[in-house]
Amino acid sequence: MNDKFDYLVFIGRFQPFHLAHLQTIRIALKQSRNIILALGSAQNERNIKNPFTVDEREQMILSNFSAEDQQRIKFVPVIDVYNDEKWQKLVKSLVAEITLPSDRIGLIGHFKDDSSYYLKFFPEWEMVELDSLHGSMSATPVREAYYRGEIIESAFPAGTSEFLHKFKETPIYLQLQHKFLTQDKSNLE
């Protein structure tokens, strides 16, 4: 293990957690003693863009790692505040609750498109910029396929796939699927 960082912060919604997310965390665990996953859109209400709760996402993510690695993965729930400055302060304060002032903190991520602009909000954290992983995978198309009843097994690690199969049997999935199939698709990104 390389101890360049005490903590690497990885920000995402993980709706759902796919192979590119898994690869990013594995890279982070090689470069840092611990990783902090800032789980975005952590408010309680579910919608078709954010179908899984914070607890469900934590369970989904951890199911893909060994017990040893699970101990090194920390979570902070980040609610949507719709103001970049407030959001940035919120993320920093949540990370500060876990870390010490002397800790070496970095940020890991990939500038995939305009939605990745937030990665520039933390200049005090060294950036570990990744190239595109696992074919520039995005959660949006696999989530849309999921609502059509398909689980794209090649997109997910085993723990996520198992979680998605179980979740598909719940009334919540059926409600979300119905909303997806009957609503305007222009706001799903």
Image (tube, rainbow, N blue to C red):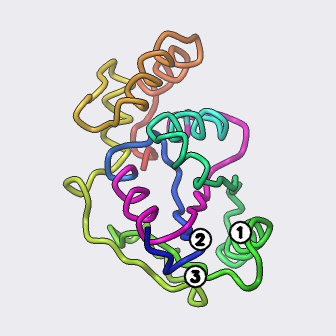
Location of mark 3 (residue) = 121
Q: Residue 125 is drawn in which quadrant?
A: bottom right
The amino acid marked with disc number 1 is: Val
Q: Indicate left or right for 175 with 17 as reference.
A: right
Residue type at the position of mark 2: Tyr
Q: Relative to residue 69, is residue 119 depicted above or below?
A: below
Query: Which sits earlier in the primary sequence, circle 1 or circle 2?
Result: 2
Q: Disc 3 marks which amino acid?
A: Phe
Left or right of residue 179: residue 113: left
Q: Nearer the viewer, residue 172 or 32?
A: 32
The residue wearing badge 1 is 95
Numbered mark located on residue 7 in the image: 2
Q: Which residues are magenta?
A: 22-50
Residue 81 position in % (x across, y down): 72, 62
Q: Residue at x 60, y 40 (%)?
A: 58
Q: Choose the circle earlier in sequence order: 1 or 3.
A: 1
Q: Secondary structure at mark 1?
A: helix
